[in-house]
Image (spheres, helix red, strand yellow):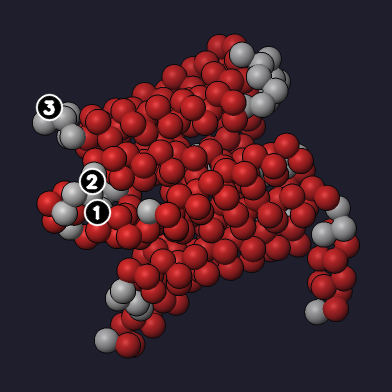
Amino acid sequence: MNEVIEKLVLYFEYPFVRYAFVVVVLSALCSSLFGATLVLKRFSFIGDGLSHIAFGAIAIAAVLKLTNETVLVMPVTIVFAVLLLGMGQNTKIKGDAAIAMLSVGSLAVGYLLMNAFSTSSNIAGDVCTTLFGSTSILTISKTDLIVSVVASIIVIIIFFLTYNRIFAVTFDETFAKATGIRADFYNLLIAVVIAIIIVLAMNLVGSLLISALVIFPALSAMRVFGSFKSVIICSAVISVVCAAAGLVVSVLAGTTVGATIVVANIVVFGIFYTAGLVRR
C-alpha cells in the first residue's frame, strides 16, 4: 500500500498529471450537472450525437493543421447542437432520426478526411485515440487546462443561475410555458451547454465514450434518490469520484483513461442498482 501511495505522489509531482486530474474532474462535474435533465427529457442520445459531430470537426481541424483544435471544434459542435434541437422539432425529421443522420454522417466525413488528407503515418492510431480517448495523459497542456477551467466555470455558473427554470422545463414543459418560462430557449441552452461539455472531455474520454460521463452518474443516482436536487448532488459526487478513481487507476496500471473512467461508472451503477432493489 505504501508503495502505491509513493508511486502516486511521484506521478503527481509532474505538472501534466495534475493538469489531467483537474481537467477530468471538472469535465466529470460539469457532465453530471445536466445528466439528470437529459435522461428525464429523453435527450440522452443528443450527447452521443454531438460527440460524433465533434469527431468530424476534429478531423477538419487536423486537415487544416490547426494547433488548437478547440477553436474550430467548439463552435461547430455548438452550431450542430442548435441544428439537432431544431430538426428534432421538425415533424418531417424526428429527433432520433436527426441525431442518427448527423452523427453517422459526421463520423463518415471525419474518417474520410483523416484518410484522404492526414500526413500521419499512423491513421488508425489517431482515429482510435479520437474515438476512445488519449492513450497517454501527456497530451494535456497548460492551454487545455486554462480552456477547461474557464469553460467549466461558465457551465457551473449557467447551471446555478438557471436551476429553477431548468427544473421546471425538465418536469413539465407545458406548465413552464404557461407560467411565462421560455422553454424553447432553455432547451436550446441545455443543448449548447452539453456541446461545451463534450468538447471539454473529448481529449480524455473520446467521442464514443463521452456520453457515459453524462448518463451513467444520473442513472446511478436515480436508482436510490427520488428528488431532482438529491439526484443532481449524488450524480455530481459519483461522477467526480469515478473520474478521479479512473485517472488514478489508469496512471498506476497504464490503462486508457477514458475506458477506465467509464468502467468505474459501470461498477458504481451496478452497486446503486442493487442498493435500489434492496431499498425497495
Residue 49 locus on image (x, y percent): 37, 37
The image quadrant that residue 224 belongs to is: bottom left
Label 3 crowding class (10 Å Cα cut-off): few <14, some 14-19, many 20+?
Answer: few
Q: What percent of the width, then of the height, locates residue 251?
A: 74, 58
Q: Quadrant of the C terminus?
A: bottom left
Q: Are marks 2 and 1 in contact (CB under 8 Å)?
A: yes
Residue 54 seen in the current view: yes
Element assignment for label 2 = helix
Disc sitting over residue 92 in the figure: 3
Q: Label 1 amino acid? A: Val
Quadrant for the N terminus, please.
bottom right
**What amino acid is at disc 2?**
Ala
Residue in the picture at 38% in, 28% down: 80
Report the residue marked by disc 1: 169
Q: What number is the disc on residue 183?
A: 2
Mark 3 or mark 1: which is in front?
A: 1
The residue drawn where x is 37% and y is 58% is 163
Left or right: 7 in relation to 153:
right
Is 280 on the left-hand or right-hand side of 2?
left
Three-letter amino acid code at the position of disc 3: Lys
Instruction: Name the one closer to the observer, 266 or 166.
Output: 166
Of badges 3 and 2, nearer the viewer stands 2
